[in-house]
Image (spheres, helix red, strand yellow):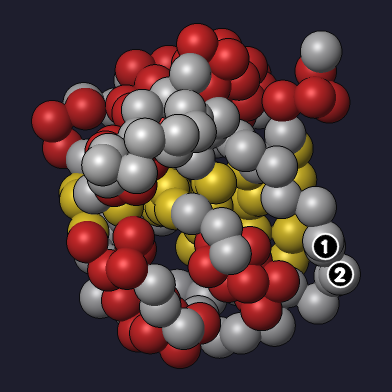
Amino acid sequence: MKRLILVRHAKTEQIYDYSKSDFDRKLLPRGHKDSAIVANQLKQKGLSPDLFVTSKAKRALETAEIYANILDFPPEDIQKEQFIYDGYTTSQMIDFIGGFDNNKETAIIFGHNPNIASFIVNLIPEDLWHFPTSCTTVINFNVENWDEIEAREGKMELYIYPKMFK
């Protein structure tokens, strides 16, 4: 079985000064707290990814680092991918995941809406429509290899977000 954990980055600063880049937006203090809340829930449930992949955008990377610290994953081993920020289709992401090392059983990916939400919806048969910041979805696939993952074949194990624990 392969397990995929998909995370929308945590709460970030707004852009009021258009000379600042969207790519460089940082997490707000609330984003740091919310990420820790959800990451601790994963830890309590024994969900420990052995592969971390994130968008290169500052807010996604900061979110990934918070999860990595709580889940005892070396932050320097987080894989950074520009295309997760730039946008992708479900088939492009499935193709990317298909290249994961099959010795890794659980992978976690940190991304942005609307792409991360669309990807989740396309992996499972359930209808989900609410993807707040720090929303984390755990999806299991009854396959031996990452390249066997297909859309609508995932089984949702967990769907959580910070407000559920406040």
**Residue at 82% from the left image edge and 61% from the top image edge:** 129
Q: Quadrant of residue 16?
A: top left
Q: Are marks 2 and 1 in contact (CB under 8 Å)?
A: yes
Number of numbered discs: 2
Q: Quadrant of residue 78?
A: top left
Residue 34 position, x and y percent, is 60, 20
Answer few, some or many: residues within 10 Å of disc 2's Cα (few below 14, many 20 plus, some between 14 and 19).
Answer: few
Q: Give the answer, above or below, for where 32 lies relative to 90.
A: above
Which residue type carries mark 2? Asp
**Residue at 58% from the left image edge and 15% from the top image edge:** 30
Which residue type carries mark 1? Leu
Q: Nearer the viewer, residue 96 or 19?
A: 19
Q: Which mark is residue 15?
A: none
Q: Secondary structure at mark 1?
A: loop
Q: Which residue is mark 1?
A: 128
**Residue at 26% from the left image edge and 42% from the top image edge:** 19
Residue 122 position, x and y percent, is 66, 79
Q: Which residue is mark 2?
A: 127
Residue 37 position, x and y percent, is 62, 17
Q: Nearer the viewer, residue 9 or 104?
A: 9
Q: Decide if residue 48 is in sight here.
A: no
Q: Nearer the viewer, residue 24 or 110?
A: 24
Q: Secondary structure at mark 2?
A: loop
Q: Give the answer, above or below, for where 136 lies relative to 63.
A: below
Side of 141 where 50 appears, left or right: left
Q: Decide if residue 107 is in sight here.
A: yes
